[in-house]
Image: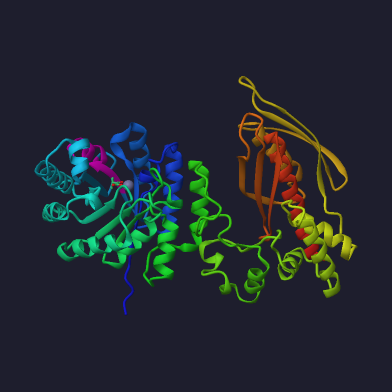
Amino acid sequence: MVMRYIRIFDTTLRDGEQMAGVALTPEDKLEIAKQLDELGVDTIEAGFAIVSEGEREAIRSIVKEGLKAEICSLARANKKDIDAAISCDVGCIHTFIATSDIHLKYKLRMSREEALRRAVEAVEYAKAHGVTVEFSAEDATRSDFSYLKEVFLAVEDAGADRIDVPDTVGIATPERMKLLISDVTSYLKVPVSVHCHNDFGLATANSLAGIEAGASQAHVTVNGIGERAGNASLEEVVMALQNLYGFKTGIRTEKIYEVSRLVRRLTGVPIQPNKAIVGDNAFSHEAGIHVHGILSNPFTYEPISPESVGRKRVIEVGKHAGKHGLRAKLEEYGIHPTEEEMKVIFERFKRLSDRGKRLTDTDLLAVARDVVGGLKAEKFVSLEELAVMTGSNVVPTASVKMSIGGKVMVASETGVGPVDAAVKAIRSLTSNLIKAELREFRLEAITGGSDALGEALVRLEDEEGNISSARAVSGDIVMASVEALVNGINKLILKRELKKG
Ligand code: KIV
Ligand code: ZN
């Protein structure tokens, strides 16, 4: 049986960017577009050309890159918007007009006949410029289905290459989406696409239902970013299509996490920890029974392997950890306690966890050191002094004094802000000791007000693939950042040292 190929139309740079508070520079957009291309999306909707000169500049620079993906601009169904898109040399124009009565009456103030005429004219006009044309009927799922059919047949006749069915306000259910797409694909000859919003948390389910019913393309955004509750997320739709439905896409799934991190960093939109595929906890295990299962066979509690989306499994050492999980964590550090020692470590660790404190690798290692003895000192690097200078007319500068393997050293660095300067100073002092990439750095306020506590999280990876994650909390965000980084470096060094034996 031939596997159905589903096109992935990525709209992170257009619908994703329309999310409140997100504004990408042309450079950011280009960086994301290159990564989307590497990821293997079929179309990159690079922006909405009519919006601004900056937007056009971004679209043009993406077109000039000569990527494998089709590059598209959004355009309302009028000549001005289409001309703006054409001026960017895109290979595809995505033109749209609303077809629901509520949009026609209150937004466009237009009759159904007028909207149909404009849709046809827009498609003909764009086609005359030799580009691929995709037509969307905005608010399709709230439109009268017989009118929608009239519009779709007319734009197909006018030369539209693909027709998209948007669930603009996310009110479809999988059952209704199936019915609608079965109907639309029964009368159209051109490929049909789905574009689902997540207002009821159904964007992924509705996209999949539409595809099951015959749509051959999904509009998605990385991390599901987009207006209001966002769009169907690329990672969820693609992984479900491939793993649950047995369909094919062009996505190199092992790059998903990298692209997700990039989009998170450049848009500043955080990802909920329990988000499918790309959330921090998506491949983390703490509960004893689960960890035991995972260690015997990962598929007991993981439906897909973390590596298939470019991630690694994390065994957490918290309150719910079991003996197997704690042993596995210690083995990561090269520590192999006997059965007897493990029993004592486990009991002591459980007693600690009952105190309600969030426990980390460092706590476990401290207990293990006490029980097993003979483990090397765990703090290779410590911060002795930190001074930062910042203000409106000064270049942010940080000076640090550190003890590194017993030797006291100092360094000063400048940065875009005091945190950046301090991080650079620490990294310059420790670079001879350890070459590590800062894979992730996050600062979050965990209480409100100007005296809020800030939490810094870092993830480091060395050239041997060892990973360490660390966090620190302080009322001073520079201190939280520095402490998290120093903890992360110590953990990484310890991991390496213990592995060497
Ligand atoms: O949600 C929507 O209807 C859109 C259209 C422009 C396709 O984003
Ligand atoms: Zn949309």
Spot occupied by residue 490 in the image (x, y as percentages of width and height):
77, 51
- Position of 163 with respect to 52 (left or right) is left
Residue at left offset 65%, top offset 34%: 452
Q: How is the image coloured?
A: rainbow
User: In front: 50, or 86?
Assistant: 50
Q: Is residue 300 above or below residue 410?
A: below
Quarter the C terminus occupies: bottom right
Q: Is residue 213 left or right of residue 437?
A: left
Q: Nearer the viewer, residue 357 or 18?
A: 357
In this view of the protein, can residue 493 be seen by the observer?
Answer: no
Residue 393 against residue 263 in the figure, above or below: above
Quarter of the image where the N terminus is located: bottom left
Task: From the viewer's side, name the closer residue of 167 and 4.
Answer: 167
Q: What residue range appears in magenta?
A: 72-86
* Residue 82 part of the magenta-drawn span: yes
Where is residue 294 shown, x and y percent of the image? 62, 71
The image quarter in which residue 165 lies = bottom left
Along the horizontal axis of the image, is 220 left or right of 406? left
Q: Residue, x 20% and y 50% (percent of image)?
A: 143
The residue at 18%/40% (across/down) is: 104
| Furthest-top residue in this view | 393
- Please state the horizontal and vertical placement of residue 3, each as a whole percent of the image: 33, 74
Q: Position of residue 313 (x, y in %)?
A: 61, 64
